[in-house]
Image (cartoon, rainbow, N blue to C red):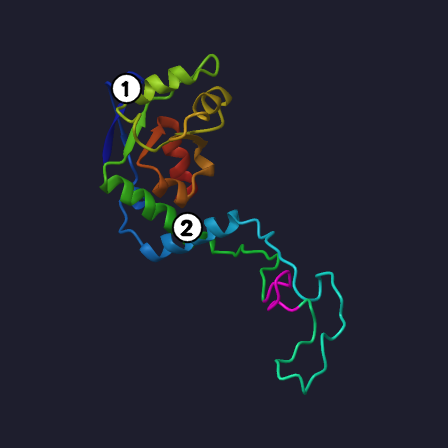
Amino acid sequence: MELAVLNTSGTETGKKVKLNSDIFGIEPNDHAIYLDVKQYLANQRQGTHSSKEKSTISGSTKKLHRQKGTGGSRKGSIKSGTFVGGARIHGPRPRDYSFKLNRKLKQLARKSALAYKVKENGITILENFNMDAPKTKNYINILNSLKASDSKTIMVLADYNENILKSGRNLPKAKVMAAKDLSTYDILNADKLILLEGSVEVIENILK
């Protein structure tokens, strides 16, 4: 499986990159993708939600009226959740939503997501380039040349490059990241993956 390498002007350089079929050409496993994305989203949750229940709310503990003989219902405390200003009944409490998955399953999920992207023609290979300084305008020009300015894109670098990272971070539909940080969620959430030449080898070494 080979893809042509484009330059920053959007034209073919004459070079081709061969994608490892054991990574980019597997039969996708939807359940692995589901579990990995579920874990990713769960790990983003702070879990700091909280509300005051009967034991934590301030108020009198005096019984409102005697138990029997009033013709009304029994009322033990003004702090009851049935009263306006009372406590929250079974309210949310701080908790940790994160959970663990096996490394091989997470690898399978990323391979599956990449395989889907290949089937959808959603991967573009871009030759390695550098920027002398952070410049959002130059980054936009590259996206325009690749006909990806209106799409959700992720540019995957072989390693961190501060100038490129800063050039794309102000664009709402564009994201720049190092290959080692690429997750299943990121792959599926993007319309197009723009892989720099050097990042392909890094991805294959991580997922082999």
- The image shows residue 11, relative to residue 200, as above or below, that is above
- The image shows residue 164, relative to residue 89, as above or below, that is above
- Image quadrant occupied by the N terminus: top left
Label 2 to label 1, Cα distance in Å?
31 Å
Most foreground residue, 140 or 183:
140
Position of residue 74 measured from the top left corner of the image (x, y, whole percent): 65, 80
Residue that label 2 marks: 37
Q: Residue furthest bottom?
A: 69
Most foreground residue, 151 or 116:
151
Q: Which residues are magenta?
A: 80-89
| Type of amino acid under label 1 | Ser
- Helix, strand or loop: magenta stretch: loop
Q: Residue furthest top?
A: 132
Residue that label 1 marks: 145
Residue 58 appears in view: yes
Residue 208 appears left or right of 67: left
Position of residue 176 measured from the top left corner of the image (x, y, whole percent): 43, 29
| Type of amino acid under label 2 | Val
